[in-house]
Image (spheres, grey):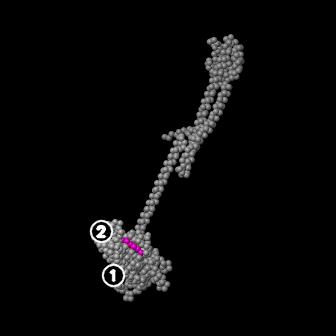
């Protein structure tokens, strides 16, 4: 049950004062306390004063009665009322005395003052003997015994008015009130001043606190700390600010550290993300390249095999050349597949190396000899040299060593168009003499590698320049595999290169113990150099004169075939020619664009263009864009080994009208060409 307390005036007063300042409250409180105390003391003073006045009045009256009574002894004894009356008349000197009466021992009035009282005067009942009495009518009277010689000779009764007494009491009251007001005023003033002195430090504290909260400045402190309880409050305030400031500093530091960590972590994650994206990108590029590299030879293999299997179709072509093309492309395919398998085995940790004696000089010469025809085909000089004494044989994994050297020399030949490719063999200065290393330097005068790619070319799936790789082929796996193999053979591969200044790859391998091994001075070069005629430029092909076989699709259109691979050029051109088309071959996008524009200008535009999308100099995308920019509307069919998801759309978006993936299916190819060019489907 809720108890409802009565709302008394102090409660009401407190409610009103709730919104006032402390100073006002304290002033009010001290004023109220002082006023109460002063009021009480004034009342006490007044009461005491009144009592004193009354007592002295009683005493005065009693003394007067005694003196007058004793003066009248003789008159009473001699029964002389006249003298007694005269003696009583002396009371006139006391204006407050209004009436007096002498009684004889029997209680009969003997004499009175005034001598003849008013007619209506009624003698009051006298008070008890010796006692003064304040009557209801506001008078003071007293009755006293008159004694002489131990005998009661009579009684005297004196009655006094109270006018004088009331005046005195009123004056006393005025003094009390004045004293009350003056002391109250002084105490209020003093209290106000005292509170001011007492509250000043509190107001300073409040000011500091407001500064802390509004300006967020925790460096402020109370300066003049006092020695009293207020000082305890001030030093407590200072200590609290110290702690808050320290906590804030710690918090800020922790916050900064945390922010640094977050930034660092974010940067790490960013790097990791970029690395993951780069790896992903590299893998996508790798997949696209592998797909392209596999599909390109597959086109030649399947196409020529198809031709050879159809007696009628193969008429007019060199069958031996077809078989050779199939074999060459098959070997190329095999090497790509081997690379991929090697890398997967390395990744899975499945590759082991065996160390057997290897006649290293003979090996390197055999490898150089096997690569020599390729070098010769490009007009490059190739040589093998030895510097100083080299061991006759070393203990290593011959297969892996051969694989590495083939890759390095193969790359040197691939990326060099003029000049030479040299292999230099020499013993390396090894930090640990008990573990000798043999070095193979493959030095070419080729295109070189930009400095920023010198590290990345050793990473799987990475190529120095994807566009160049398109020109030269390759999957970007060779160097990654070679370096891993070199490391397994106790060595490494490093590269120094300058763009257009050639490259120098250094392969080092552990030789195993050379105890009992003969060291030979082979300071001589194989010095073989062979130059060949440059590759034949684009050719205009004409349909074989022999009777055209009955093909399901007959074409009578002029077709431009833009294709860089010689095998695919031959195959596709042959298929088109057989179908009755007139075929012009361009080995890159630039030639294709020029040939197309020339033909249009000459009034003999091509009916359809078959465009390989990945070609050196200018790729298919660039060529299509340029042709479309010239306003050419000739149907362009993308012919590409890029057959991953999205590649078709990419070609169509680039401006092609259709898309034919490699390896090319003869029927499909002819159908697509017929769909876009002048021709008919049988
Ligand atoms: P691939 O040759 O199959 O692309 P590699 O791993 O053998 O793969 O080579 C990686 C890349 O290194 C090449 O694509 C090429 O950009 C660069 N490279 C390797 N050897 C040479 C060289 N001798 N001269 C110029 N660039 C080279």
- Is residue 513 in view from this perspective? yes
Residue 434 % position (x, y) = 32, 66
**Left or right: 532 in relation to 52:** left
Q: Which of the two discs, 1 and 2, sits closer to the camera?
A: 2
Number of callouts: 2
Residue 527 % position (x, y) = 36, 79
Residue highlighted by disc 1:
323
Residue drawn 35% across and 70% down? 428
Q: Quadrant of the C terminus?
A: bottom left
| Classed neighbour count for the residue bearing mark 2: other residues with Cα under 10 Å, few (<14), some (14–19), many (≥20) | few
- Closer to the chain start, of discs 1 and 2, is 1
Toward which corner of the image does residue 453 lie, by quadrant? Answer: bottom left
**Left or right: 86 in relation to 529:** right
**Mark 1 CB in 8 Å range of ligand 1?**
no
Magenta span: predominant SS is: strand
**Left or right: 122 in relation to 441:** right
Of 376 and 178, the residue lying toward us: 376
- Report, in whole angstroms, how far the alpha carbon at label 1 lies from the one at label 2: 47 Å
Mark sitting on residue 513: 2
Instruction: Write down which quadrant ligand 1 falls in.
Output: bottom left
Residue 116 % position (x, y) = 71, 18
542 is higher (above) or lower (below) than 181: below
Of 520 and 149, the residue lying toward us: 520
Toward which corner of the image does residue 636 lie, by quadrant? Answer: bottom left
User: In terms of secondary structure, where does tag 1 sit?
Assistant: helix
Of 397 and 462, the residue lying toward us: 397
Of 369 and 180, the residue lying toward us: 369
Q: Which residues make up the magenta segment?
A: 502-507
Toward which corner of the image does residue 369 lie, by quadrant? Answer: bottom left
């Amino acid at each position: 049950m809720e108890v409802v307390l009565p709302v008394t005036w102090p409660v009401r007063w407190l409610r009103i004062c709730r919104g006032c300042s402390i100073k006002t409250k304290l002033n009010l409180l001290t004023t109220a306390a002082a006023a109460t105390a002063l009021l009480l003391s004034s009342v006490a003073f007044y009461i005491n004063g009144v009592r004193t006045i009354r007592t002295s009045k009683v005493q005065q009256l009693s003394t007067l009665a005694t003196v007058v009574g004793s003066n009248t002894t003789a008159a009473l004894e001699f029964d002389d009322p006249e003298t007694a009356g005269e003696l009583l008349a002396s009371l006139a000197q006391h204006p407050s005395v209004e009436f007096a009466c002498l009684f004889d021992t029997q209680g009969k009035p003997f004499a009175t003052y005034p001598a003849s009282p008013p007619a209506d005067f009624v003698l009051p009942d006298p008070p008890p003997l010796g006692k003064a009495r304040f009557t209801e009518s506001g008078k003071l009277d007293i009755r006293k015994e008159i004694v002489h010689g131990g005998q009661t000779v009579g009684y005297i009764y004196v009655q006094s008015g109270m006018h004088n007494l009331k005046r005195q009491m009123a004056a006393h009251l005025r003094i009390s009130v004045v004293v009350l007001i003056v002391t109250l005023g002084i105490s209020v003033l003093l209290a106000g001043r005292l509170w001011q002195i007492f509250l000043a430090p509190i107001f300073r504290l409040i000011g500091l606190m407001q500064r802390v909260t509004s300006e967020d400045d925790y460096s402020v402190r109370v300066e003049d700390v006092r020695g009293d309880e207020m000082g305890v409050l001030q030093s407590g305030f200072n200590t609290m600010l110290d702690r808050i400031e320290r906590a804030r500093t710690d918090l800020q530091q922790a916050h900064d550290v945390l922010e640094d960590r977050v930034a660092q972590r974010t940067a790490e994650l960013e790097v990791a993300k970029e690395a993951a994206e780069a790896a992903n990108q590299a893998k996508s590029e790798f997949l696209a390249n592998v797909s392209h590299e596999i599909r390109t030879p597959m086109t030649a293999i399947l196409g020529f095999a198809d031709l050879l299997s159809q007696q009628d179709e193969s008429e007019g072509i060199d069958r031996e050349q077809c078989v050779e093309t199939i074999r060459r492309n098959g070997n190329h395919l095999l090497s790509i597949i081997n690379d991929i398998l090697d890398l997967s085995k390395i990744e899975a940790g499945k590759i082991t190396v065996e160390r057997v004696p290897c006649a290293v000089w003979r090996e390197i010469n055999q490898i150089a000899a096997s690569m020599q025809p390729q070098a010769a085909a490009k007009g490059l000089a190739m040589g093998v040299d030895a510097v100083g004494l080299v061991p006759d044989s070393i203990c290593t994994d011959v297969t892996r060593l051969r694989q590495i050297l083939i890759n390095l020399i193969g790359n040197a030949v691939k990326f060099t168009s003029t000049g030479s490719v040299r292999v230099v063999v020499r013993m390396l200065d090894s930090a640990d003499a008990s573990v000798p290393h043999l070095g193979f330097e493959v030095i070419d005068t080729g295109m070189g590698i930009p400095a920023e790619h010198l590290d990345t070319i050793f990473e799987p799936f990475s190529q120095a320049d994807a566009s160049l790789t398109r020109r030269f082929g390759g999957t970007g796996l060779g160097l990654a595999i070679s370096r891993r193999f070199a490391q397994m053979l106790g060595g490494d591969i490093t590269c120094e290169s300058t763009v257009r200044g050639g490259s120098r790859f250094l392969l080092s391998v552990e030789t195993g113990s050379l105890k009992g091994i003969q060291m030979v001075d082979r300071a001589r070069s194989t010095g073989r150099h062979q130059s060949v005629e440059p590759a034949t430029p684009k050719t205009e092909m004409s349909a074989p004169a022999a009777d055209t076989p009955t093909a399901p699709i007959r074409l009578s259109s002029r077709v431009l075939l833009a294709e860089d691979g010689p095998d695919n050029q031959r195959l596709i051109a042959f298929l088109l020619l057989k179908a009755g088309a007139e075929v012009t071959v361009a080995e890159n996008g630039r030639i294709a664009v020029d040939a197309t524009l020339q033909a249009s200008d000459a009034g003999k535009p091509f009916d359809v263009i078959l465009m390989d999308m990945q070609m050196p100099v200018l790729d298919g995308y660039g060529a299509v864009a340029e042709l479309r920019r010239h306003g050419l509307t000739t149907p362009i069919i993308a012919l590409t080994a890029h057959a991953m998801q999205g590649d078709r759309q990419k070609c169509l978006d680039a401006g092609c009208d259709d898309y034919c993936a490699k390896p090319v299916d003869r029927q499909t190819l002819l159908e697509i060409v017929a769909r876009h060019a002048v021709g008919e489907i049988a």
